Image: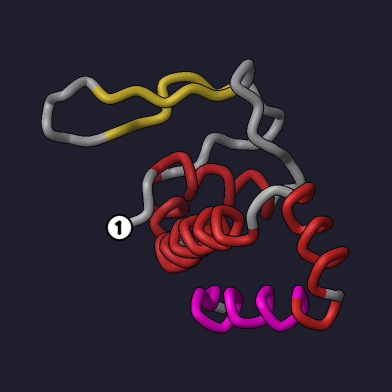
Amino acid sequence: MANLKTKTELYLKANSETWDDKKVSLQNNSDGNGDFISSWNYDIAKPTDEQLATYETAGNTEEANNIVIATRKSLYGSWEKQLEEINEQGIDAWKERIAQIKADNPKES
């Protein structure tokens, strides 16, 4: 299940806005009802639970892809390491390694 922050970010993006900690905050009262939007200072309407629910699938994909991206970054190594690899082994070897990392860690569409 996608978290509220992800779904809210997608709602904002769909309305040509971006997340701003000064304009929105989330809270969880630990009452078993989960997270909720505790403050909203955008010029667009605060999303309803029903509107946010429409972003569930896209939110799940976004969160899964963020994990894949983090995994890829760790496997790529620093840009310094990659430049060293290109210099020592050649660009084709580097391209092949990067392609294999992407193949082993595919993003959802």
Q: Residue at x 79, y 73 (%)?
A: 89
Residue 67 locus on image (x, y percent): 46, 57
Q: Which quadrant of the figure contains the N terminus?
A: bottom left
For mark 1, what is the residue? 1
Q: Nearer the viewer, residue 42 or 61?
A: 61
Q: Residue at x 48, y 22 (%)?
A: 25
Q: Nearer the viewer, residue 28 or 71?
A: 71
Residue 40 locus on image (x, y percent): 55, 24
Note whether residue 53 is visible. Answer: yes
Does 9 sit left or right of 98 as displayed?
left
Residue 79 locus on image (x, y percent): 77, 50
Classified by dominant secondary structure, the portion drawn in magenta counts as helix
Does 80 sit left or right of 25 as displayed?
right
Q: Reply above or below: 100 against 70.
A: below
Residue 45 falls in which quadrant of the image?
Answer: top right
Note whether residue 108 is visible. Answer: no
Q: Reply above or below: 99 against 3.
A: below
Q: Reply above or below: 23 against 16.
A: above
Q: Which residues are magenta?
A: 94-108
What residue type is disc 1 on? Met
